[in-house]
Image (cartoon, grey):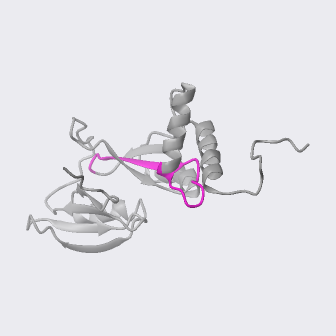
Amino acid sequence: MRKLQAQGIHHITLVGADRQTSIDFWEGVLGMPFIFEQPNLDREAESHLYFDPGDGRLITIFTNEDRNPDPARTPTDPGCVHHLAINVSRASFSQAVERLDERGISHSGIKDRGFMDSIYFKDPMGFLIELACYRFEPPAGSSHAEVFIEAHRIRVARGDYNIAEIHLADAIEAIVERSHGSLSDDRTPKNPY
């Protein structure tokens, strides 16, 4: 038996309302360029809109001119998607509350997630969107996932409840020490003062 090895998310497709509501939200609020459109090849009455979230992947929306926006929260039953988290820069994140407020979009306010900051709001169809901003950059040649694995190990060894910035900082230090050589015989912390 063998795995079907994943190499990243190809695209995510959501069911939207009408075409213009989808364009106004995904491009007009979230800044994702509307890059192409074609019919939904499985349902003739629908259109299929494609947006670029900024990382070369795709967010796609099925639209139908007979559907209207419904802001009631989408189901969160087992098997349903709870929310979609979108990565934003620290500069964009720092503007999120103000920019959502100026549109009258209700939101959660900033949430401290230990390793990142988040803010939640709903799209016009009631689907929960999270703007997420990491509190760290991985070392050159490493990924966020590598830092998380190391931070998790550190957190568990210390008996801490969740990953916090101290675990991230210590994880980054450990990754750099393992992956970057040095001419020093002793790389332990020192006080030169």
Would residue 39 be found to the left or right of residue 93 on screen?
left
**Residue 127 in magenta stretch:** yes
| Residue at 39% across, 68% down | 56
Residue 180, how many percent across, how many down?
65, 57
Residue 44 horizontal/vertical position (percent): 8, 68
Q: Say above or below: 163 vs 181.
A: above
Quadrant (top left/top right/bottom left/bottom right) for the C terminus:
top right
What residue occupies the far right of the structure in this picture?
193
Choose top left, top right, bottom left or bottom right for residue 49: bottom left
Query: What span is colored magenta in the figure?
Result: 125-145
- The image quarter in which residue 75 lies: top left
Q: State whether residue 117 appears in this view.
A: no
Viewer-side residue, 144 vs 82: 144
The front one of 1 and 74 is: 1
Looking at this view, is 20 or 153 the one in front? Answer: 153
Q: Who is closer to the viewer here, 147 or 28?
A: 147
- Would residue 66 be visible to someone looking at this image? yes
Instruction: Count how many numbered circles sit on residues in the image.
Output: 0
Q: Residue at the location (58% across, 51% down)?
A: 94
Q: Is residue 66 magenta?
A: no
**Residue 93: % across, % down:** 54, 52
Q: Position of residue 126 (x, y in %)?
A: 28, 46
